[in-house]
Image (cartoon, grey):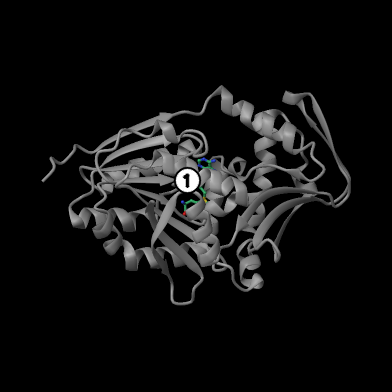
Amino acid sequence: MEPILEGTVEVRSYLGLADERTLADDVLDGLTRPLKELPPKHLYDARGSELFDAICELPEYYQTRTERQILRTQAKPVVARTGAVELVELGSGSADKTRVLLDAMREAGTLRRYVPVDVSETTVRAAAARLIDDYPGLAVHGVIGDFERHLTHLPEPLGPRLFAFLGGTIGNFPPGSRRRFLRGLRKVMAPGDHLLLGTDVVKDPHVIEAAYDDSAGVTAQFNLNMLHVLNRELGANFDVDAFEHVAFFDRKREWIEMRLRAREEQHVRVEALNLDIDFSAREELRTEISAKFTPGRLRGDLAAAGLELVELYADPDKLFAVSLSRRR
Ligand SMILES: C[S@@+](CC[C@H](N)C(=O)[O-])C[C@H]1O[C@@H](n2cnc3c(N)ncnc32)[C@H](O)[C@@H]1O
């Protein structure tokens, strides 16, 4: 038996001036394009993370409860198969579903460390504090950073690792970047490591659209929050009420898009960038895509990244899928 570690929390942030520049660069680049666009990571300040947690509770948002249900049934075999002593979670958020995996590792007697990686510092710190209370002896090493740029800052492995990338967040990458991201991830994986990947599944577009345009308007608030982030961080003067939330399923590309549409003509000043941006009436700003998967798309992406599928788990209604893969 390995010695049990004292429950410890260490949180390191790799976000710095360069990341303020990233937001600035993303705005400069994305808001001057013919189709205005910003990456979804800027949705997640402290308020955005809270709103996302509220989305996960919505009746229309089937993803969270379905993925949790799959994890509940499959966590034990996954842990037995991988022998993981460490859970590294990308885009960990509130780390709520994560507990199903941590419980299975604890029951198997292998659990030593949890490594959450997320851009949202408040979320990682809050989750870490809750987890060490609930899992005596667990070491938590939080990495506050961008999973596209900071995976080289993961701590030295303590043994076989299970990488988890849940919630369908992988779908936020466009197809080419998705493969590049998975290739980068494969590079930091050691031979005995595994990846547990949650992917939303192609299905009736009405079901998908409802999940991104709920009747209580929480997703609309989440989307509009991006404008508050720009106002606060870059001294922009977006009139948030002058924009509306739009979500639609692109049937050809099989992804959902979230956009913000100007209700009427807008002129916006971004002070920190000395930049003026015009929106014509009904012009849209794309804030997120979320690609949906077929088994073929998933296999293709994994193979292109040098990963091989070990198991593919789904719920009985085939709403969501969780795959286990390893380096080929
Ligand atoms: C869709 S939520 C999923 C949260 C959680 N894993 C779940 O399944 O409910 C995406 C999470 O990824 C984080 N995130 C988004 N872009 C990121 C990036 N580029 N680097 C690190 N974290 C990111 C967000 O802060 C958020 O916590």
Q: Residue at x 61, y 48 (%)?
A: 176
Seen as rendered, the residue at the extreme bottom is 316
The image quadrant of residue 247 is bottom right
Type of amino acid at the residue the image marks with label 1? Gly
Residue 163 in the figure: left or right of residue 273? left
Residue 206 in the figure: left or right of residue 269? left
Q: Residue 135 versus residue 180: which sits nearer the camera?
A: 180
Residue 309 in the figure: left or right of residue 85? right
SS type, badge 1 = loop
Residue 296 in the figure: left or right of residue 99? right
Q: Residue at x 55, y 44 (%)?
A: 180
Q: Is mark 1 within 8 Å of ligand 1?
A: yes
Residue receiving disc 1 = 91
Q: Residue at x 52, y 48 (%)?
A: 50
Q: Is residue 123 visible?
A: no
Q: Residue at x 55, y 66 (%)?
A: 294
Q: Is residue 219 visible?
A: yes
The image quadrant of residue 113 is top left
Seen as rendered, the residue at the extreme left is 1
Give neighbour class at mark 1: few <14, some 14-19, many 20+ (Cα, 10 Å). many
Whether 105 is drawn above or below 76: the answer is above
Whether 202 is drawn above or below 14: the answer is below
**Residue 123 placed where, x, y %?**
45, 42
**Residue 110 placed where, x, y %?**
20, 50
Q: Residue 195 versus residue 143: which sits nearer the camera?
A: 195
**Residue 233 placed where, x, y %?**
65, 30
**Tally of marks:** 1
